[in-house]
Amino acid sequence: GGFVALGALMLAVLMASVFGGGALLMRDARRQRQDALQKTSFVSNVSHELKTPLTSIRMYAELLQEKRVDDPARAEKFLGIIVSESKRLSRLVGNVLDFSRLEQGRKRYSPEHVLLHEVVHEVVESMKEALVAYGLDVVFEAEDPELEAVVDRDALSQVLVNLLDNAGKYAAAGLKAVVRIVRGADGSPEIHVMDRGPGISPEKAKRIFEKFYRADDGTTAATSGCGLGLGIARLLMRGMGGDVRHESRTGGGSCFVVTLPGKGRG
Ligand code: ADP
């Protein structure tokens, strides 16, 4: 009797491992297929993203080179487009380069004491013009202008640029975005980037920080992007001992909460 029972048990263990292994292999295959699909759409998104600004830079530069623009005001406007499109291109290339560095763990940080008010103000000012072009006004509020953190200044700026760029792309209908520096529940400083756009449903919110992920809906159909902005923002913040998370906002819209390492002074 005992022998039969032992045999049955071993058979059960064998069957369980065969089925379990099979299921794991299938899951792995599905994941690989999904990864491959995401990579293909990433490459086509990036190529498209590179091509659009390059085309307009070239067109306006050629018009100016051929001296076909007599009106100085128009020439000035074209130069402005060339500059802002080049900036867009640098942002994109910077993001892609940074992403590979971050993924391979090769990103180096230069932490220093920074006055958060100063960094946020600088980023908001540098983005203002681009956001107004999307139809979005930005308001900057600092609860405590003396709050400090030990972070890499450029990395923090990049995180804020990515969040504001998204507010412009997806939430301009809300007309106004608010950037606020506050003291979090545990006393450490936080930066909130809030909008009154369409918000992000809980199912989508689970995935927005994944690489190459773009919500498959009306918001992304009309906008450019390659699904790296939030992934980079989170990797950068985690690399510095902080984080970025998404919260729904009462009254509609999104709130991205950037948490900073350590206790704030002041
Ligand atoms: P990208 O903007 O290149 O698509 P991101 O990683 O920056 O990539 O964002 C991922 C997705 O999260 C976006 O495609 C968009 O669907 C959604 N998203 C990001 N920010 C917002 C926002 N402020 N409001 C609504 N949806 C957003």
Image (cartoon, helix red, strand yellow):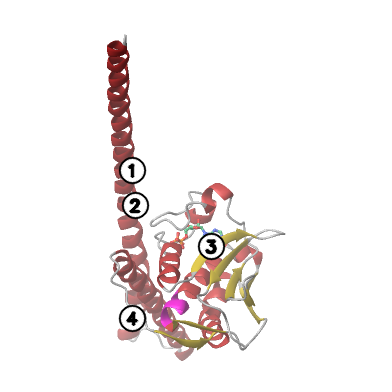
Residue at which label 2 appears: 41
Q: Nearer the viewer, residue 188 or 175?
A: 188
Instruction: Tell which circle, 4 or 2, labels the residue nearer the N-terminal end.
Output: 2
Q: Mark 2 and mark 1 in contact (Cβ < 8 Å)?
A: no
Label 1 and label 3: CA atoms lie apart by: 24 Å
Q: Nearer the viewer, residue 152 or 46?
A: 152
Instruction: Tell which circle, 1 or 4, labels the residue nearer the N-terminal end.
Output: 1
Disc 1 residue type (three-letter) = Arg
The circle on residue 39 is: none
The circle on residue 245 is: 3
Residue at which label 1 appears: 31
Label 4 and label 3: CA atoms lie apart by: 41 Å
Image-based side of 22 in relation to 122, left or right: left
Q: Nearer the viewer, mark 1 or mark 2?
A: 1
Quarter of image, res 81: bottom left
Disc 4 residue type (three-letter) = Ala
Quarter of image, res 88: bottom left
Mark 3 Cα shell of 10 Å, populated few (<14), some (14-19), many (≥20) = some
Q: Is residue 47 magenta?
A: no
Range covered by the magenta-colored residues:
154-158
- Please tell me whether mark 3 sits on a helix, a strand or a loop: strand
Instruction: Tell which circle, 3 or 2, labels the residue nearer the N-terminal end.
Output: 2
Quadrant where the C terminus sits is: bottom right
Disc 3 residue type (three-letter) = Arg
Rendered residue at 32%/36% (across/down):
24
Label 3 and label 2: CA atoms lie apart by: 25 Å
Rendered residue at 45%/88% (across/down):
76
The circle on residue 61 is: 4
